Image (cartoon, grey):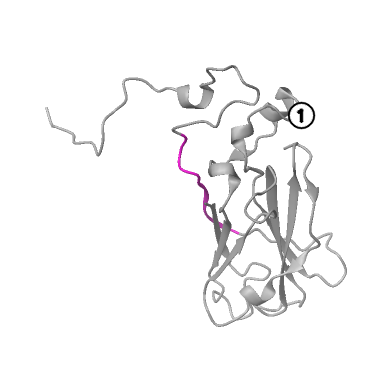
Amino acid sequence: MPVVKLPGTLPARVTDAGYLKNPMGAQPFPYPSNMPVAIWQQTQAWLTWGTAGLPAGVEARAVWSSPTFDLRPDLRGIMVSPGTQRNSGAVPIWLPRGGAGKLWLQVDNLDAVSWGLTGLRVTSTEFASIRDGNDLKQITDPEDITTEFVGTAECALGSFVPPGSGYPPRYYRVKVTFDFLVDSSAEPEWPNPSFRLSAAYY
């Protein structure tokens, strides 16, 4: 029988003791221990473009939204109600007290078609809630970030830092909107410039 070498040891059992440990019965709980590395990632995906029902002046649009991030999962269910917390579907990011994390966004294939940057406008909008993952509100006006994308490079890299100067609100989400303001329907492949997007929070 072949021998399989592992890079570590297998635990006797999977346990959530570090998450649930509360010897004093305190509310809120003590800060948990042995929590996983703080990361969320989305594999590369092609942006999906549409041309119907758009505002005047917009010829084609693609929208990407991050999931809702729970940047203080150590607070568990002590805010709002336990039912709301369970149903929020937020992605926990286990950074100590929520600090020092960024949402990274990478868009490849910007040079895939000759018209791919003609009339392109990219805007980002942020949403947050200090206590309810089901009730995020828009906290910024759409910010024009087109300069991060228009150039000669085949790839653009951007990052988003939650508000709070290193001490963020509990729930946070970002939406990025890609608009073509010029009609390039005479060009091959319109309206899809084959932009490929990937994202990660860490």
Q: Which residues are magenta?
A: 35-46
Residue at disc 1, secondary structure:
loop
* Image coords of residue 6 (percent x, y): 23, 36
Residue 178 shown in magenta: no
Q: Nearer the viewer, residue 195 or 64?
A: 64
Is residue 16 visible in the rendered image? The answer is no
The N terminus: image quadrant:
top left
- Residue drawn at x 51%, y 27% as measured from the top left: 19
Quarter location, residue 139? bottom right
Quarter location, residue 199? bottom right
Q: Residue furthest right?
A: 56
Question: Badge 1, how many Cα within 10 Å: few under 14, some, many 20+?
Answer: few
* Image coords of residue 146 (percent x, y): 68, 74
Q: Amino acid at mark 1?
A: Val
Compared across the picture, whether 126 is left or right of 41 comes to: right
Q: Nearer the viewer, residue 99 or 85?
A: 99
- Residue drawn at x 69%, y 29% as measured from the top left: 85
* Image coords of residue 62 (percent x, y): 70, 61
Above-or-below relation of 167 to 116: above
Is residue 92 visible in the rendered image? The answer is yes
Residue at label 1? Answer: 80
Quarter location, residue 126? bottom right
Above-or-below relation of 15 to 151: above
Q: Nearer the viewer, residue 172 or 178?
A: 172
